[in-house]
Image (cartoon, helix red, strand yellow):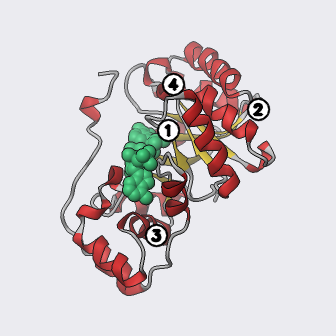
Amino acid sequence: MTEIPSPGLGTSGNDDHEQCAATVESAIEMGYRHVDTAQMYDNEAAVGEGIARADVDREEVFLATKVHPENLAPEDVRRTVEESLDRLGVDRVDLLYVHWPTGAYDPETTLPAFDELHDAGATRHVAVSNFTPALLDEACEILDAPVVANQVEVHPLLQQDDLRAYAHEHDVTLVAYAPILRGEAGDVPELREVAEKHDATPSQVSLAWLHAKDVVPIPKATGDGHLRENFETPDLDDEDVATIDAIDRERRLIDPDAAPWN
Ligand SMILES: NC(=O)c1ccc[n+]([C@@H]2O[C@H](COP(=O)([O-])OP(=O)(O)OC[C@H]3O[C@@H](n4cnc5c(N)ncnc54)[C@H](OP(=O)(O)O)[C@@H]3O)[C@@H](O)[C@H]2O)c1
C-alpha cells in the first residue's frame, strides 16, 4: 500500500493568501508531511508558497491536489493540471485526485488523461474522491495506474463501513475529509467521554479513532493551537474504539447536491 503521511492538512476555505501560506508553513515546521488542496479551493498558489517557505525539503512533503469536476474533459485535465503545477510552483504533485465523479467526468475519457499525466511524471500517484465501490471498480478497470486513495467524508458519525472494507481489500487508502466534524466533535457524547479519559479533546479522539481504523485524516486548521492539537492525538485502547464503533447515529455533513458546481 502507498504510504500516505498522516495526518494531512486540509485547506478548504483557507483562501486568504497570506493566512493560508503561513498556516501551511507552520504546519510543515510542526511536523505535518501531507498537504491537501484542490483547484476548487482557490489557494494552490498560497499552499505552494507555504511549502516553499517552510524549512523542510519539498521532497519530504506529500502534496495532493484535485481536478475540479468542471475540468474533467481530457483536454481540460491536461491544461488545468499544468496550471495547478504552475500555481503550486512544483514540477509534480504526489497525488492527483478526480475531485468528484460528476460535472464533466466521463471515466472512458477522463481517466486516460490521468494516466497520461502519471506517465509524464506530473503526478506520482492517481487518486479519486467521493467514489462509491462501484465507481472505484470501474475506475480501476480503466486506469493503468493504480488508484492509491479514495477521499471521502469519514468520522465517528459517518463510519463508512463498506468503503473501509473495500479500501482494505483493494489496497486503497481511505482519506477522511471533515474528520473532526467541521469543528463540532464536542457535540458527540461518546467522543467527550473518551476524551475525558485521555485528558484529550473530542477532536483529538475523532482523529485517533480514524488512525485506529487505518484511515488518513486531513483536518483543516488555521492557528497554531488547532494545528498542534490535531497533530498530537492519544492512542486509543480497544474499549475506546469499541465505544465509538457502537455509535449508530449517522450524520453526513457535506451534501453533494449542494456542491458549488450543481
Ligand atoms: N474531497 C472533497 O470533496 C472534500 C470535501 C470537503 C473537504 N475536503 C478536504 O478535507 C479537509 C477537511 O475537511 P473540512 O475542512 O470540511 O472539515 P474539518 O477538518 O472536520 O473541520 C474544519 C473546521 O474545524 C475547525 N477546527 C480545526 N481544528 C480544530 C480543533 N482541534 N478543535 C475545534 N475546531 C477545530 C477549523 O477551524 P480553524 O480553521 O479556525 O482552525 C474548521 O472550522 C478540507 O479542508 C479539504 O482539504 C475535501
Q: Which residue is mark 2?
A: 121
Mark 3 is on which residue type?
Answer: Ala
Helix, strand or loop at label 4? It is loop
Q: Residues within 10 Å of mark 1 (few under 14, many from 20)?
A: many
Mark 1 is on which residue type?
Answer: Ala
Circle 1/circle 4 CB separation < 8 Å: no
- From the Cβ of disc 2, is ligand 1 less than 8 Å away? no
Circle 2/circle 3 CB separation < 8 Å: no
> Which of pointers 2 and 4 lies earlier in the amino acid sequence?
4
- From the Cβ of disc 3, is ligand 1 less than 8 Å away? no
Residue 76 at x, y percent in the picture: 56, 14
Quarter of the image for residue 69 reads top left
Residue 26 seen: yes
Q: Residue at x 70, y 39 (%)?
A: 51
Residue 208 at x, y percent in the picture: 46, 70
State the separation of the CA atoms marked 1 and 3: 30 Å
Dot label at residue 208: 3
Residue 101 at x, y percent in the picture: 40, 31
Q: Residue at x 70, y 53 (%)?
A: 29
Q: Which residue is mark 1?
A: 139
- Closer to us: 92 or 224: 224
Dot label at residue 19: none
Q: Which residue is mark 4?
A: 42
State the separation of the CA atoms marked 1 and 4: 27 Å
Q: Is 117 left or right of 232, judged from the image as shown?
A: right
